[in-house]
Amino acid sequence: MSQTDMIQTAFDRESADEVILKGRPSPRPRDAATLILVRRDAAQPRVLMGKRSRGHDFMPDKYVFPGGRVDPQDGRVFTISELNPDTDRLLRFKSRRSPRAFALTAIRETFEETGLLMGRYADTPARAPAGWQPLYALNIAPCLKDLHFIGRAITPPYRPKRFDARFFMAEAEKVLIDDRPPLDGAELHDLQWVTLADAKTLDLPGVTRFMLDEIGDRLDRRSPSGPPFLRWTRSGHSQDRIL
């Protein structure tokens, strides 16, 4: 498949009943973040995926990585370590939000959707930002240094709900506090660690399938430098590499 075909596929409409906006302005994309956890404790690397609830109005019944919308308080969370300078720089590209907010959103959303704990035990501040009370109560502080920014995608303007999503990848053995299994919840169910080949047999959004290819290239050390940036331009679907 050519690069052009891959970009088109990544943005293809995922359902026949998708709502097309007619005569209305396109909604502004909301900042979001996704975390791709990779395990290397088997013959082949595995990634954590879950199935979105049928009740969702955005990608229902699709298998995705944990993630969600950035909350205003995410960027203010106490951490043990910060993003490495190169990751911080890449995340600043065409963004007004603090880079650490995206990484912290990915960690919080993964905890909320899977129950997995990321970070280190520490003396956390007495007052927790909104949404972080459960982790602060466990005296767990996030670590950001092992999160790698691997891609960005903006939902096309013809969708009724849009996100500007940053994708992170991290090795589970480095970022998880323990080896507890992921727990199904209201947001994601059928959570499972799957090989990249098995993941591609699932019902996936186009962007998720695209990112699986990016992960495979990175694990094989074949990825071009810089995260891909998928978005819509006046001339159609576009991809650049953020350098």
Image (cartoon, grey):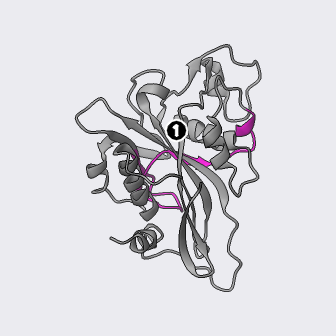
* Residue 30, image quadrant: bottom right
Query: Disc 1 on helix, strand or loop?
Result: helix
- Residue 234 vs 14, above or below: the answer is below
Q: Can residue 190 be seen here?
A: no
In the picture as drawn, the residue positioned furthest to the left comes out as 43
Viewer-proximal residue, 12 or 217? 217
User: Residue 53, image x and y in percent?
Assistant: 45, 53
Amino acid at circle 1: Thr
User: Residue 240, image x and y in percent?
Assistant: 55, 64
Tell me which residue sits at (67%, 27%) in the image.
Answer: 133
User: Residue 17, image x and y in percent?
Assistant: 46, 75
Magenta span includes 56: yes
Residue that label 1 marks: 110
Compared across the picture, whether 131 is left or right of 58 comes to right
Tell me which residue sits at (53%, 32%) in the image.
Answer: 146
In the picture as drawn, the residue positioned furthest to the top comes out as 123
Viewer-proximal residue, 219 or 231? 219
Task: Give the magenta range.
Answer: 49-76
